Amino acid sequence: MTETDYPMIEHGAPGMVEFPGSVVRLPSGNTLIADGGDELGLGSEVVEVDPLGNLVWRYDDEGRLSFVHSARLTQAGNILITDTTNDRVIEVSRDKRIVFTSDAWGGGTGRLSDGSHLGYPNDAYELADGSLFICDRNTNRALQVDRQGQVLWQYSEGIKHPHNAHPLPNGNVMISDSDRNQILEVNRERQVVWSYGDGSTAMLNWPRCAQRLESGHTMICDSKNARVIEVTPEGRLVWEYKVDYFAKFYDIQPLPNGNVLVSDQQHHQVIEVDRWGNYRWLHRNFHLVGPILPSLKNGSFKLRDEKTGLPQHWNFAKRHDEGGGRVIWDESNQPSPCPGLEFDRHGFLYLQQTIAVKPGLRYKLAAKIKTEGVQGSASFMMCFLDKYGGQIYDMGDIPRGDLYLGDNDWTLDTAEAMAPPSATCVELRLYINGAGKAWMKEVMFHS
Amino acid sequence: MDQETKDRLLKKMEDSKKVIREALQKFPRQEIAITWTGGKDSTLVLWLFRQVCQEDGLELPIVVSIDEYDHFDEIHAFIDKYAAAWDLNLVMAINQDVVDAAGGKLGAPVRVAALNQRNQAEVQRLGWEEEEFPFEAESYVGNHLMKTVPFNRFIEEHGIKAVVQGLRWDEQAARANDEYFSYREPGELAPGHWRINPILHFTERDVWNTNHGFGVPYNELYAQGYRSLGAKSTSKKFAQVPAWEQDLENTGERDGRRQDKEAAMDKLRALGYM
């Protein structure tokens, strides 16, 4: 087998949708997509595509946007964007001028009237009076603010990593309380007037969007259960669209024709499905970029790219870095220096390479790991991907070696896993989340 | 042993024998191999397999023991003793080429270039890029060459299609979903074969109760405090009391880390890291 490269397209290619967040069908019939970018942290942008998938508009603030989660239309016809890793909300005109930025609040500090700063915002809507409704994930709140950063209302009662909070026509607010596996409708007195989900993952597993339908039913994007469901006010399930892969659907927009627009993060596509599950529209222009190696390369890290500072054949994946982290080297290691990751916050980082696999074969990973002050965890992972470049397992279920916390001297770690039936390649990773340092050496991988 | 425990163990032994009989129906005897480390689990499997063969008037399949060189003399003495007493058709599989390249010295460096072609191909297949590796059980390369390679070579040379082992569900969380019969797809330099594990449903405690209650022999090292036996240099005594008198239910049989992983994962999930 030869190395399979895909040289025509580069990481973060403009217009390529790698990780769709919010999806909005515009009055024109075009579709507005917030694209979080690829796993290297490149290519985050907002795109508008016509029904045939042609790119009609795109915006990335000259490469400055970082892990954009949402892009929604304002009354002026501009686009309101949550630039998530940059902790800001901006409004951009069609001629690509920033007409509003939350960075201007608090005399240019970006601070709100209560002294706080936005923390990893993942959705923003403009209300009729021009104020903004923002879902601020890492501060665990949904808030309404005026254009000067004055907090007009907020809800933070116990919710954990919320998504897609937005006001309903009746004045109440719908919140996806994602980490607690529930959907809440709260009134302006902060009373829960309706909810769905008992906290169990069987009922809802990391829901990230809920929309109230005209019928009074609620449509919910049940991300980690790979489905969209519709429930009655009494909580009876009346419709379900479920797929047989780990789709991690992000956003939904129920359409007037009865179909629903869905962003499918793992298969890097936006789909419009009807009530029977037919694809009535699809936008996918994603390609797995970079070589898929026939076997492990440079597991000794003797080859280093001096320009990037990365070990050759390894990628630094930092889409979820929340703005921190870097690759480090233990230069004193013998017989050759070995690389590692240094991190200082809640998200996660990988150093990884992609290797082709055959379904049904058992693969073994062996490597040495050393850690320093890890709060969170470090580990090796075998993240199997399917032919669409979709991760097959949820983060907690990815085959991995031991978890390393705190300080550990060099330890040989091994992991073994069978490539699942739909696997075509694997991302071999050194992983770290939370703060700390982790190094690796003597990496081996074989069937 | 009380009657209730005895009945429970008899039932477990019958279930194991069912698996063994199914194996004997599925595969010709010549294509079955019983792996035997001399440890308590594989000895119990061998003992049960012998019983089935005696009851059914069959000849016992070939038995293979991997000699990883870094072994306890007590284990070899035990293997020799029962190989003779039970009249076993036993193959001791060893990767002599690696032993020679290390000059027979544990811990000595092994130059990859000094190995034969097959072993060099194995080293390359692992992705090892250094010119040498240490001859020790803690080296992944050394371990692979001394355990996996002779095992694969044995099943290849003897045309084996089914390998009988002594894994148990309670050994570690990762084993909890193992099945009695599982197929290993062929890989590069690794022939495809079935793995059969007749005592999956035995707990560590069950094994000791069976050994003591039904006269299954076991190695004297367990009486000295070893809980599990692997390479000599990596096996440690857990306590100064016999294995069966230790707190089997609340401590890890191997090194405990694997079990801890599950707890750590739960903790990280709760912290929102997963």
Image: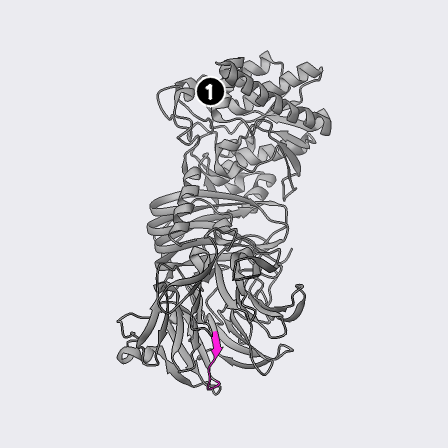
Quadrant assignment, res A53: bottom right
Taking the image as shown, residue A236 lies to the left or right of residue B138, namely right
Q: Magenta segment, which residues?
A: A71-77
- Asked whether residue A73 is drawn in magenta, I would say yes
Quadrant assignment, res A155: bottom left
Residue closest to the eye, B151 or A224: A224
Residue closest to the eye, B14 or A348: B14
Residue denoted by label 1:
B73
Label 1 is found on which chain of the structure?
A: B
Q: Position of residue B183 (x, y in %)?
A: 65, 38
Q: Report if residue A339 is visible in the image.
A: no
Residue closest to the eye, A24 or A53: A24
Q: Is residue A419 above or below residue A35?
A: above
Q: Is residue A263 above or below residue B89?
A: below
Q: Position of residue B213 (x, y in %)?
A: 51, 14
- Identity, as a three-letter code, of the amino acid under mark 1: Asp
- Asked whether residue B154 is drawn in magenta, I would say no
Q: Report if residue A412 is visible in the image.
A: yes
Q: Is residue A390 above or below residue B132?
A: below
Q: Position of residue A262 (x, y in %)?
A: 57, 67
Residue closest to the eye, B127 or A5: A5
Label 1 SS: helix
